[in-house]
Structure formats: structure tokens, C-alpha cells
Image (cartoon, rainbow, N blue to C red):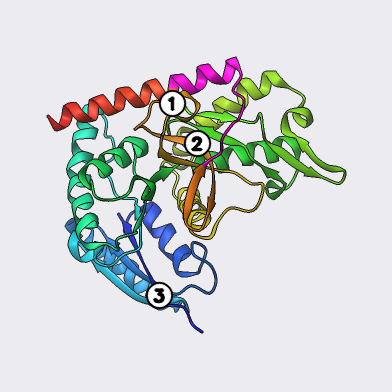
Amino acid sequence: MAKEPVRVLVTGAAGQIGYALVPMIARGMMLGPDQPVILHMLDIPPALDSLNGVKMELVDAAFPLLKGIVATTDVVEACTGVSIAVMVGGFPRKEGMERKDVMAKNLAIYKSQASALEKHAASDCKVLVVANPVNTNALILKEFAPSMSEKNISCLARLDQNRALGQISERLNVPVSDVKNVIIWGNHSSTQYPDVNYATVKTPSGEKSVRELVNDDEWLRKEFIAEVQQRGAAIIKARKLSSALSAASASCDHIRDWVLGTPEGTWVSMGVYSDGSYGIPAGLIYAFPVTCKNGEWTIVPGLDIDDFSRKKLDLSAEELSDERALAHSCLS
């Protein structure tokens, strides 16, 4: 029996990430090869012509799973009835702008979108924030949508996790699919902590730890961490544009695992509400290792945190606390 279509919202759909993301969703990369979708695409009025061009291309691609398209600049129309919302749209930081200026611009955007989601989306709508600063934008969205469950709001850490997996894969010359349980802790910023302490690689003789196979703690503690932290900047330098394809792919990965579940024994990194786990202040949206089942995420419990890791976790928590205070100062 054919499944009912799921309504999926992508904001900023005419932008670089949106343009890469919507065909992935329409092809089944987000919700599976047997799940029909209706795409809701939102962008700002100056981007309407471009948005309509994206709609035309989606029609021309004749995706079998794509059962409808809503392309609009009206936030209420965009949010009505959606079960999944991928919040890609945001105000980018421009030359000469202070962090507070960017935060204030994004607060206005997220206030409007949060209110529309709360009133018009499905009651159990899952929200993924992709627009930077992702952790704090997700936190603000929740504050403007108080009746939405905190378990249904998350932000993207999967791009950083995928980058970390890619670096280990290249270092060891193994398929990236054979590497698992690299953790991203904290903020999507230069304070994020890519942690390989529990990461493993599938080998002909069984699973072995990444740390054992790399056999170079100096590289793992310095170059590897810096490479993951600075990968976005390196892509901007090379491409003259920020990450789009990889961010879109990571967004699909994030939602797919959240909705369909993580494989047994595999953790993924998601920015979620801290409940105080691992000494992270409750109420921050912070990247943790999680498992997903039946549409619910659960923070992986009981991992030992060594002194080196403890300092990294606390540094990112401190930065996120400062960002939250800055956001609240913009609201007052």
C-alpha cells in the first residue's frame, strides 16, 4: 500500500544549500526510496524569480516521489501542514558586521518562522536548523515557539561529523562507510570538538579503534581537530562560496536517522537540548552523540570524558552560553 506523502519545508530554498537539498529530498535521500513527499519551499520576495526557477527544475526532473510543490514567500503558507522543517534560510554575516548585528537580523527571521511553525505545522513537526549560528538560532526558535517540544528542535552537527569521518577515512585509506562513532561535541564553530576516543574502523579482523590504527596522538589532538574545525573556511577559500552540497547531504543524513533510526551500535552527532548530561549546562543546544529510534533521539549515556576532552567540552559550552546571552541582549 502506497504511503501518504510527507510535507517537508525548506526555507531559503532558492539559495545554494536549498538548491542542492531539494532534489535530494525529492529523490528519497532524506526519508527513503518509498516515501512520497510534498515540498514546501520558502524564500524572501527578492528571490521569488529564482525560487520559481527551482520549482520549474523540480517539475522538469520528474521525480516519482515528488507529489506536489509549494513555492512561496509567505511564511504561513510555507509552514502549513509540514511534518519536517529544514531551516536553511538566514542572514549571512557580511563584511564589517558585528556578531550582535547578525544575531539581531536572524532573530527577526526566526521569530516569524517559529510563530508560523507553532501555529500551522503538524503538531509533531521535526525542525532542523541549518542557518548559522545554528545552535543559537535553534535555541531562539524554541523560545519563540514555546508549545513545540524541545525534543522536536535540533541543529546540524552532522556536517562536522561527516567531515571528521572523511578525514579519518583519508588518513587510514579506508572506505568512509567503515568508520563510525566519531563524535562532535558542542558548537558549530571553531570551538567544536571532534572526538575519536570511541571511534572504530571495520577491518578484516574485526573492529579496531581509530586511535590504535592512526597511531599518532599528536595528529589526532592537533591537525585532525583543526582540520575539521576549519573545513568550512577552507571550502570558502577554495570555492569562493560556502559549503552547499555537503551541508545539504548532511541535512538529509540528520533527518533520515532521526526519523528512520540509527543502525544498531552506531551513534550520530546532533545539536539537541542539553539536559545536563556530561556537565553541559541544561538549556543550551549543544552537539552530543545520540541514538535515534521511533523518531526520538537519546543522548548516549555514560561515556568517560578524559581531561583533554573535558576542557574542550567546557570551552564550547562557555561559548554557547555567551551566544545565548548575546541573543537575549538583542531581544531586550
Amino acid on which disc 1 is placed: Ile
Give the CA separation, mark 2 to mark 3: 31 Å
Where residue 180 appears, as percent x and y from the top left, is 66, 43
Residue 312 shown in magenta? yes
For the question of whether residue 122 can be seen, the reply is yes
Where residue 135 appears, as percent x and y from the top left, is 36, 37
Of the 4 image quadrants, the one containing the C terminus is top left
Amino acid on which disc 3 is placed: Pro
* Secondary element at tag 2: strand
Where residue 50 appears, as percent x and y from the top left, is 28, 62
Crowd band around label 1 with a 10 angstrom C-alpha radius: few (<14), some (14–19), many (20+): many
Q: Is residue 6 above or below residue 322?
A: below
Q: Residue at x 17, y 50 (%)?
A: 112
Would residue 280 appear left or right of 283 to someone viewing this image? right
Residues shaded magenta = 299-315
Dots 2, 3 in contact, CB < 8 A: no
Amino acid on which disc 2 is placed: Phe
Q: Badge 1 is on which residue?
A: 280
Q: Badge 2 is on which residue?
A: 288
Q: Residue 308 falls in which quadrant of the image?
A: top right
Would residue 128 appear left or right of 211 to someone viewing this image? left
Crowd band around label 2 with a 10 angstrom C-alpha radius: few (<14), some (14–19), many (20+): many
Give the CA separation, mark 2 to mark 1: 10 Å
Tell which circle, 2 or 3, labels the residue nearer the N-terminal end.
Answer: 3
Q: Is residue 121 above or below residue 297?
A: below
- Foreground: disc 3 or disc 1: 1
Give the CA separation, mark 3 to mark 1: 38 Å
Residue 5 is marked as 3
Residue 6 shown in magenta? no
- Foreground of the two, 85 or 153: 153
Q: Residue at x 36, y 32 (%)?
A: 284
